[in-house]
Amino acid sequence: MITKESPIGVIDSGIGGFSVARKVQKLMPHENLLYLGDGANTPYGNHSAEEILTMTRYMLRFMEDHGVKALLVACNTISCLIDQYRDEMSCPVLSVVQAGADAVAQLPAHKVGVISTCFTASTHCYPDLIGKVAPDKQVISHGCPNLANLVERNVGNPAGQAAIDDDLRENLEQLVNEEKVECCVLGCTHYPLVEENINRLYPQLKLVDPAEQMARTVGRYLEEKGLVNDQPGQGKLDIFTTGSTEEYTMKAAKVGLDPVTSVQFYPPMKL
Ligand code: DGL
């Protein structure tokens, strides 16, 4: 049975969803969170749509079995395919791409850049969804072939920062200095984890992290349904990964997740 104490589920191909989980922890500190990252199969952006759907269904079952009261799809790549699996869950399923589009709609900017995985860019889901909620915007979408993977591997590793910076320059130079976008959506949840790198390289560029909008949307839903967790203490965060629990423990701390109640292994699905 779903109660106020039931956790909010968060899924991602890897550690990218930490950027959403930490925002929820900040805005709704009393909520319990249950995180699943498919560390064994990340990055999803390099798989076919069929494989992504199969791996997503595996994660949905996990969340359904744990009775989450809402599910945050904290992966843009998975969110692009949301219409094909939303009805399989008994709780509401929120898309981070929709959150990004809703965040853009509130901005005065006219020319909007979006960086994402190549898969997300190939589906046109950002231009399509922004077009629905803010038809006056011009959207320039750019796929980054390797950035999510680089961030996944190098969070908390000082020696990996130069490679991340080089990749960011390669992917942002044209959007910033030729297209002159007025803001840029971080259309992959891994990218806010290197927001400091982007701010250092492009201090004038306004960044849009869909996580805040996503946290607000789920907060509104919980209020409407009387499902806000009103426990006095801080909520739990239980992290499951199909990859290395040691790495997840270290990276969760590096990106500022606090508290982390447990980090546990969950067997990966075999493709
Ligand atoms: N964090 C995921 C996203 O937002 C990364 C996708 C991937 O694994 O390719 O798209």
Image: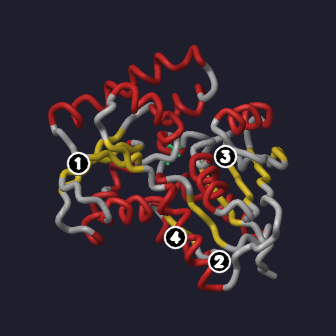
Query: Can you tell which quarter of the image residue 138 is in?
Result: bottom left
Q: Which mark is residue 91?
A: 2
Give the residue type that dot 4 points to: Thr
Q: CA distance from mark 4 to mark 1?
A: 25 Å
Q: Amino acid at mark 3?
A: Asp
Tell me whether circle 2 and circle 1 mark residues in contact (CB < 8 Å): no
Mark earlier in primary sequence (3, 1): 3
Which residue is identified by label 4?
217
> Is disc 3 placed on a helix, strand or loop?
loop
Left-right relation of 249 to 112: right
How far apart marks 4 and 3 lie (CA) works out to 24 Å
Crowd band around label 1 with a 10 angstrom C-alpha radius: few (<14), some (14–19), many (20+): some
Q: Name the residue that disc number 1 marks.
A: 140
- Tell which tag, 4 or 2, sits nearer the viewer: 4
Residue located 78% across and 46% down the image: 260
Q: CA distance from mark 2 to mark 1?
A: 33 Å
The secondary element bearing badge 2 is classed as: loop
Q: Residue at x 55, y 18 (%)?
A: 160
Residue 184 image offset from top left, x and y in percent: 32, 45
Q: Is residue 262 above or below residue 220?
A: above
For marks 3 and 1, give the one nearer the viewer.
1
Q: What's under tag 1, amino acid-wise?
A: Ile
For the residue pair 246 and 20, the one nearer the viewer reads as: 20
Mark nearer the N terminus (4 vs 1): 1
Q: Mark 3 = which residue?
A: 38
**Which of pointers 4 and 3 lies earlier in the amino acid sequence?**
3
Q: Residue at x 24, y 51 (%)?
A: 112
Res 201 quadrant in image: top left
